[in-house]
Amino acid sequence: MEATTGPNAHEKPPLGIKKIYKKFQRLDRAALDRERDSLDFSRDNNVDPEVRQSQLLKLSSEVRQAFVDFLEIDNATLDGTKPSDAMPTVYEVAAVPVPSDVQLAMLEKLLLRDLCNPDHKTNVHIHHNVPYPDQRADRSTASYFDACSSSLDFQPKDPTIHKPFNTSQYLNKKLRWMTLGGQYDWTNKVYPSGSPPPFPQDIKTLVEHLFPMKAEAAIVNLYSPGDTLSLHRDVSEECDQPLVSISLGCDGIFIAGLEGEDGNGGPRVAVMRLRSGDAVLMSGESRYAWHGVPKVLEGTCPEWMKDWPGMHSGSDGSGRFAGWGGWMAGKRVNLNVRQMFA
């Protein structure tokens, strides 16, 4: 599928935006904590009033209901608050702050369930034969984090070039991305022809209730501190509907920029420190903005998420993933959703 609108997917980013990307790539944690040229939505006093344009709204009853439906719980139990309690504010450049229990449920659905679906390809599929977990002894669906999956062997398609590895290596470092719905071809920067696999319905429903778009394709990026995402534009879709990015785990520095100069003669760039639960909507002019992640900050995962998928993570309450306690302490998971067709 070739893009019919928007710029060239193979074009190089402008030098001015690239310089800012490299600047933030070089900064250490202490310098980033002091940085005033980035937006940090966890601190109101760090948001320029002109950018914030005051508090736009509180979470509406419709948004709250979308979270409740996703969790399949009673409205009054969402995040330990009552429906009448004040919820996080929403800013023009940062969409919906996702509640902690919804974040944990998203991790469970994406990494315990969807990762085990052969329809959803990963970067590992390119060079290796990917084995899948068997059922557990109690006949329930297993995940890669289950003990029964620890002996899985990922054999290379060409042993002269690549080496085999085990489940632990797969989850800790080898796995970098997974696709949902439309299976994007990263090498050729196109979507394959033919009907895409179904998009996970519960995540699709949540995204479409929260944002003005259809969830038809997504890329789930997995980062560790030290990893980056180079500057690029998402232009392979056949429409210019918004992009949605939801952050889980460690903080990431996110840069989005447009060609042309700002009022001071510099590039038009926004630098954001995205924390777990931040969701960014790129629409309108920013739909085709250059964007990337020059930095993932070590030691910034929220305390209540660090042990995922440990003792508290399994929905069955069995503690079956206790051996993986602390895995998310060194991870950033980013769900990037887009609409493929007009």
Image: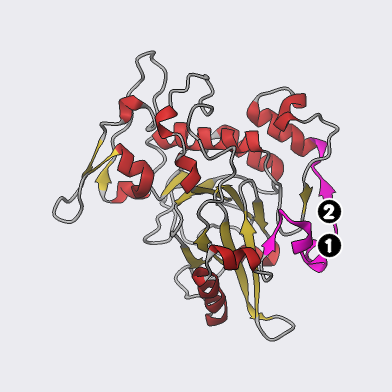
Give the residue at mark 1.
53
> Looking at numbered disc 1 in the image, what kind of residue is underneath it?
Gln
Residue 50, position as x, y percentages in the image = 82, 68
Magenta span: 39-61
Q: Secondary structure at mark 2?
A: loop
Q: Residue at x 68, y 39 (%)?
A: 99
Decide: is 77 above or below 21. above
Asked if the magenta segment contains residue 264, the reply would be no
Where, quadrant-wise, is the N terminus in this rendering? bottom left
Decide: is 277 above or below 36. above
The residue furthest bottom is 265
Q: Residue at x 82, y 30 (%)?
A: 83
Residue 289 visible in the snapshot = no
Image position of 64 (left or right of 325): right
| Mark linked to residue 56 | 2
Q: Residue at x 59, y 37 (%)?
A: 304
